[in-house]
Amino acid sequence: TQAEMNVEAGRRANVAQQQMERAIVALKRSGWLEPPQISNLDKAQENWEVYAKAQAEFAAAEFEGGSMAPLVYASELESVTISRTGELNPRNEGTLRRLNFAGIRIKKTPETLRQRGSGSFLSGPVEDR
C-alpha cells in the first residue's frame, strides 16, 4: 500500500542519514582535518542540511496534499544524503580536489595511503615512516 511505501521510504532516508553521520564522525576523527577545517565542515554541513530539506520539499511539492508526497520527500532526502555521504569520503579523489579547492588541506593523500597499503580513511591516517 501507499502507506507502507511511505514508511519504507522514511526508513531508508533515516538509514542514509545515519550512514552520513557516521562518515562525518569518521572524517573528524581521522586526523585528516585541522580544527579550523572541522569547524568549516560543521558550518557546511549545517548549510547542507537546510539545502537537503528544501530540495526534498521541492521534489514533493508536485504531490502536495497527496498520499505520495511523503514517499517523494523521503526518497529525495535519501538520494541527496547518499550523494553527500560520497562527497564526505576522502578516498574519492574528486572529494580531495573539492576540499583542497575550498582551502581544506588534507594531511594524507590517496598516494600516501596506497603506498602504505591502507585503502580506507575510516581507519584513520597512515603514519609517515
Image: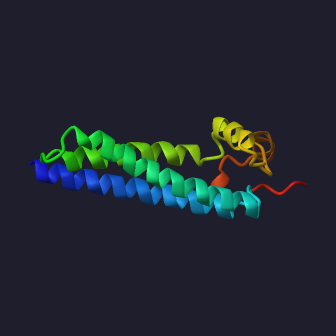
Q: Residue at x 52, y 53 (%)?
A: 47
**Rendered location of residue 6, percent (x, y):** 19, 51
**Rendered location of residue 42, percent (x, y):** 60, 60
Q: Residue furthest right?
A: 129
Q: How many discs mark residues in the rendered view?
A: 0
Above or below, comparing residue 26 to residue 70 in the picture: below
Please state if 3 lies on the left or on the right of 39 as rendered.
Answer: left
Q: Residue at x 34, y 43 (%)?
A: 76
Inspect this view and state whether residue 69 appears. Answer: yes
Q: Residue furthest left?
A: 1
Please state if 47 lies on the left or on the right of 53 as rendered.
Answer: right
Please state if 8 lies on the left or on the right of 88 as rendered.
Answer: left
Q: How is the image coloured?
A: rainbow
Above or below, comparing residue 57 to residue 27 in the picture: above
**Rendered location of residue 124, percent (x, y):** 70, 59
Above or below, comparing residue 62 to residue 53 in the picture: above
Q: Residue at x 65, y 43 (%)?
A: 91
Locate the C terminus by quadrant.
bottom right
Question: Relative to the observer, which residue lies in front, 111 or 49?
Answer: 49
Q: Residue at x 20, y 46 (%)?
A: 69
Question: Relative to the observer, which residue lies in front, 68 or 27?
Answer: 68
**Rendered location of residue 114, percent (x, y):** 76, 41
Inspect this view and state whether residue 123 appears. Answer: no
Please state if 52 lies on the left or on the right of 41 as rendered.
Answer: left
